[in-house]
Amino acid sequence: MRKVLAVALVGALIAANALAAPADPSTAFIPLVKGAELRLAGPLPSTEVFFQLPGHIALAGPARLTLRFRASQLLLASVSTATVEINGTPIRSIRLPSEAGEDGRTLEITVPSGLLRIGWNTARVHCLLLTTDVLCRDVDNPACWFVLDKGTGITVPYRRLELFPEPGRFP
């Protein structure tokens, strides 16, 4: 009995040291584009990405959204726009193509504190892409495009929370 208790006590001490939270925050990059690129086409395209922040972390500062994009050079700059939302809250809108050059552009956006939460989150990009003054004329226009490139994602600073044994979670 004593040997079993001693082994259990040593195992608990090792587990406690292994699961202790690090002193300095770490960062995680959550990609929002799977593959090389994500193409949005038509006058009112949008995309929504779901991602999860695990329950064993605490956010340790503001997150940064990196938006790498390209847009058709034929878009009307006076009306063509792209808007980024986190969990349904708009955080940045830009005009296109003036801010998107031929080779693309990288935009760094600070995510306001409190928008990201532990558990499931959404990131959404929606656009108004017009090459003429008439919305219905651009429905099938191949020149109405916006591309999110690889490297688009959210960098989240976090600290690990100390874990405690929960025997009830094991089979």
Image: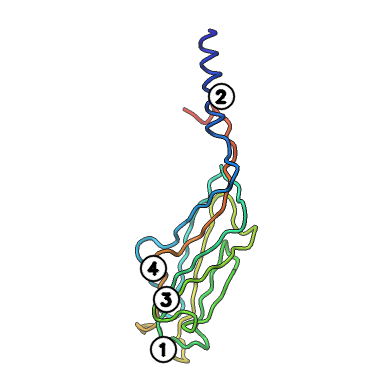
Q: Which residue is mark 3?
A: 104
In this rendering, which labeled residue sits more in front, label 2 or label 1?
Answer: 2
Relative to 40, say whether 122 is above or below.
Answer: above
Q: Amino acid at mark 1?
A: Arg
Nearest to the eye among marks 1 and 4: give it.
4
Q: Say which label, 3 or 1, has the lower sequence index.
A: 3
> Along the line of sight, which residue is nearer the eye, 113 or 47?
113
Query: Residue 46 placed where, x, y %?
Result: 46, 71
Q: Secondary structure at mark 3?
A: loop
Mark 3 touches mark 1? (CB < 8 Å): no
Q: What element does badge 4 sit on?
A: strand
* Residue, disc 4: 38
If you read the primary sequence from the N terminus, does the residue marked by circle 1 or circle 4 appear first? 4
What residue is disc 2 on?
A: 13
Q: Nearer the viewer, mark 4 or mark 2?
A: 2
* Left or right placement of residue 87 versus residue 41 in this view: right
Neighbor class of circle 2 (other Cα within 10 Å; few <14, some 14-19, many 20+) is few
Numbered label attached to residue 137: 1
Residue placed most toward the observer, 96 or 140: 96
